[in-house]
Image (cartoon, helix red, strand yellow):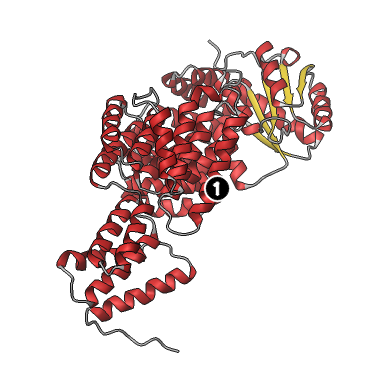
Amino acid sequence: MNSVDSSELDHLPALNVLIIDDNPIVHDTLKAAFENMGIRNIKSAQNAFHGLRLCEEHHFHIVICAFNVKSDKDGFHLLEELKFKGYVNKRTVLIFLSSETSEALVNSIIELQPDDFWVKPLNAKNIEARLEHTLQIKQKLFNIYQAIDAGNYSKVIYYAERHLLNPKLQKYQANLLRMKAEALLDLREFAAAELFYRDLLCSFKYPWTHIGFVKSLLKQDKLDEIETLLGELTSQPETRFATYEMLAEYYIDREEYEQAYDEIKKATALAPRNIERNKKSWDLARLTHDHEGQYIATKNMAQYARNSIHDSPELALNVIRTGIDYANTLTDGTAGKILAETERRLTAIETDYEDAQYFKEQIVISRARLHNAKNEAEKAKRIVENQVSLKSSVSIEDNLDKVKVFHELGMREEAMKLLTAVQRQIAGDSLTSQVVGKYVERETTERDEIHFTPKQLNSMAVEFYKRNRMGPAAKVLEQALQLSPKNYKLAISLLKVLIKIRRQDQHNQDQLDLANSTISRLEMMEIPGSDAQVFGELSRMWKEANGEVVEEKKV
């Protein structure tokens, strides 16, 4: 048996090439370069739709795809779809083109693991040299790529070790070592991977060696050993995205969801196009009561999924749902803006989707929730009583939204019955299953104990305050904060009430503890501008009310 097996890529005249780019000059430049190399079977597509149709009809050995395919979908989602449908695999020579080199785009493309990334405008001589180099790697290591496509990572290690003994393949040593190391991780041989990466780091200080080493230790729960290294990796553009991603997974595995959420938000900001990552961000925002974060995550999903394999009416509905949820936590004029935007989105769904009749009840529920959020409870109640079924759906998200509308309209018995039905639907070990399980458990408790939205509770607190009923005002604001713990305006309002209670000498120990915990909560929040000054003044007033010596401000 030869140390390097022959491959389907060896005979250049037999190779099929696909170029997807909306610029005819790019096609001409690439075709000339390929023809100089003896490659003649070249197909061109100027949009994603045509590229996909060609992939249905032909098998391509080389695919070159541009990011900016203006007429339908961007290159990221096109490559994602080509991989998903099996038109592109590890044996395919995959090259990405772009004139844009922003960190967000580069991170997104790295996730799809093309063999090379060419920046426009293209240089014909550079094209031939880089293509020849990339093609040689695929040819020489073809059997390893074949094993990766088959998911046979033991065979990947076998071939890599054999090739490393071949002097003719010395120039591919780094590629082979990386493939072996990543195969150890895929086989979950984390201790062996750690030792292997430690040895590699003595000679190969590449970003991938550091990332792989960190992953092998995180999988063994050895975070303390690499804290300094993590700081270094998150400060470098070429490694910070992957590091944030790994840390998010580490904290998810440990069910430390607040920390996981912090890391996934950083990773999502650096590579925003990945729908699954945005879904994780949404799930973690739900677990941490971050209503604004939920709204942002669902908006990102709807935006970046447009014209992709992920696109669906459900994504648009989820933006509407989280928009209403977010508005129900706001106590200022922002709520009206969010509701107006949400209403526009709901109207667009009814007109833009031809099959809108298939999710009519979901639209009706959102319409009812909108009315209720705008203090039009009677309209909302009529809609629900006449058009909403009490039966549960196969969709957990649909059921959760129905629970919300029942609860918001005071139909608490119906809400609790439906929550019980949702609990029976939850199964699996995925993050979404964990999230929905914990979310439903929390919702069951909160909806049994708290019968209003944060916005409604805040309005009740205002009325209690006007009537000098400070105890009830503090109680409903505490409940509002339980539902919306990241809303600093609610926390500031609660602190104002507790200061007045303390000054009137009507406090109890629980209220003293609540004030101190509220101050601690506010100290950890990012409070903008004038609100930060308000908090500073309230904090000073609380100390004075408790007889503490407060230093005079220097003028």
* Residue 417 image offset from top left, x and y in percent: 26, 30
**Which quadrant holds residue 549?**
bottom left
In this picture, is 177 found above or below 540? above
Query: From the image, which quarter does the C terminus lie in?
Result: bottom left
Kindly state the secondary structure of the residue where label 1 is placed. Answer: helix
Residue at 43 percent of width and 39 percent of height: 380
| Residue count near mark 1 (Cα–Cα under 10 Å), binned few <14, some 14–19, many ≥20 | some
Q: Nearer the viewer, residue 276 or 101?
A: 276
Residue at 43 percent of width and 74 percent of height: 533
* Residue 217 image offset from top left, x and y in percent: 35, 41
* Residue 103 image offset from top left, x and y in percent: 60, 47
Q: Residue furthest bottom?
A: 555
Res 114 seen here = no
Residue 57 appears left or right of 442: right
In this picture, is 115 found above or below 255? above
* Residue 337 image offset from top left, x and y in percent: 54, 52
**Which quadrant holds residue 186?**
top left
For label 1, the residue is 340
- The amino acid type, in three-letter code, at marker 1 is Ala
Q: Nearer the viewer, residue 292 or 221?
A: 292
Q: Nearer the viewer, residue 290 or 505?
A: 505
Q: Residue furthest left?
A: 509
In this picture, is 459 found above or below 449? below
